[in-house]
Amino acid sequence: MLVRHAFLSLDPYMASAIKGRHMSGAVAPGDVMPGETLGRVAASRHPDFAEGDVVISRGGWQLWSVAEPADPALRGMAAALSPGATKLSVPDGVSPSLFLGVLGMPGLTAFAGVRDVLAPKPGETFVVSAAAGAVGGTAGQVARAMGARSIGIAGSPEKCRLVIETFGFDGCVNYRDPDWKQTLAALCPDGVDAYFDTVGGEMLKGVMPRLAMGGRVMLCGMMEQYNSAEILPGPSLAPILQRRATVTGFVVYDHWETMPLWRRLGTTWIAQGRLRFTESVTAGLDGAPQAFADLMAGRNVGKCIVAFDP
Ligand code: NAP
């Protein structure tokens, strides 16, 4: 079918695609810039699609595109990135453009990220960056619908007003204000239970110290990095996002009740030769300072023990 586009979605991932760093693929010079489009069928050779039908497809940055019908058997990423066209029935009074925004990919990002990943509980504090944007603005509203307090982070007083007055968030911090971290702390007196991160970098760094016990962070986007030619210093968090990996906190004290079980099991395994170990034993307390210095310099092998004279 030949489609005349009415709307093209512009999304931050395109910057990464140009740099060859996006999972949807790279854009080479001469390629049509990729992008989701909403348009009307101008001519069709397919029985299910007629002239005038409204379709959504990945038509790219151009006025016209030729599309095949989307393969309904495709699922997940293959379906999302398929160039095929899907027919839309647009309810009266709804702008079709919304299917590229709040009712489309960005809206789904917000909804699924909040409901299925961060899962804020009633009364919890939910924070989202780029809160005035398509994803962030929707995410905070979904969190509120789940009973959480939503606090936004956005880049100007006007954006913060939109976030509070129009989107109904409980508060919003302008991160261009030098005191934004203190304002965030004041708005989140019990800490941040769930952080929907769309920016990474300095903003993530500013929110991390405010995490509540058991807090969750979802890496959704990296606005700060998309604009930079180089990968920013520090460990790259991109693989966590791209591979849907989980990074979680652990403190052994929370698992102390497992100690008797581990002792029984470990003792049995050692007796059976299934668990082996090394110790580096220093005789007498006099040797302890050097043994400790060796441990901290990596010169030990195995568990450092000081053995006192019998
Ligand atoms: P958007 O929020 O409408 O636009 C991006 C916003 O990012 C800007 O308006 C800007 O608002 C903010 N921002 C914060 N720090 C920035 C910086 N250092 N440089 C530039 N902008 C900065 O865009 P969106 O479409 O809703 O997407 C939001 C985020 O979600 C993006 O990171 C996007 O990649 C991500 N996303 C991820 C997925 C996924 O599957 N993981 C899907 C869709 C979108 P301020 O003025 O408030 O700073």
Image: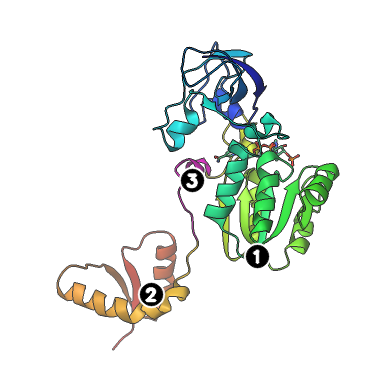
Image disc number at residue 287: 2
Residue bearing mark 3:
240
Mark 1: few, some, or many residues within 10 Å (few <14, many ≥20)? many
Tell me: residue 74, above or below residue 39: below
**Tag 2, which secondary structure?**
helix
User: Closer to the camera: disc 1 or disc 2?
Assistant: 1
User: Closer to the camera: disc 2 or disc 3?
Assistant: 3
Q: Quadrant of residue 109?
A: top right
Looking at the picture, how far across and down is residue 90, in whole percent? Answer: 64, 32
**Tag 3, which secondary structure?**
helix
- For the residue marked with disc 3, what is the amino acid? Ile
| Image quarter where ligand 1 lies | top right
Residue bearing mark 1:
124
Which residue is depicted at the point 39% across and 59% down?
Answer: 298
Q: CA distance from mark 1 to mark 2?
A: 51 Å
Tell me: residue 48, above or below residue 209: above
| Range shown magenta | 237-248
| Residue farthest to the left, as pictured | 272
Label 2 or label 3, whichever comes before in sequence order = 3
In magenta segment, residue 121: no
Label 1 beta carbon within 8 A of ligand 1: no
Looking at the picture, how far across and down is residue 31, in whole percent? Answer: 53, 14
Residue 165 in view: yes
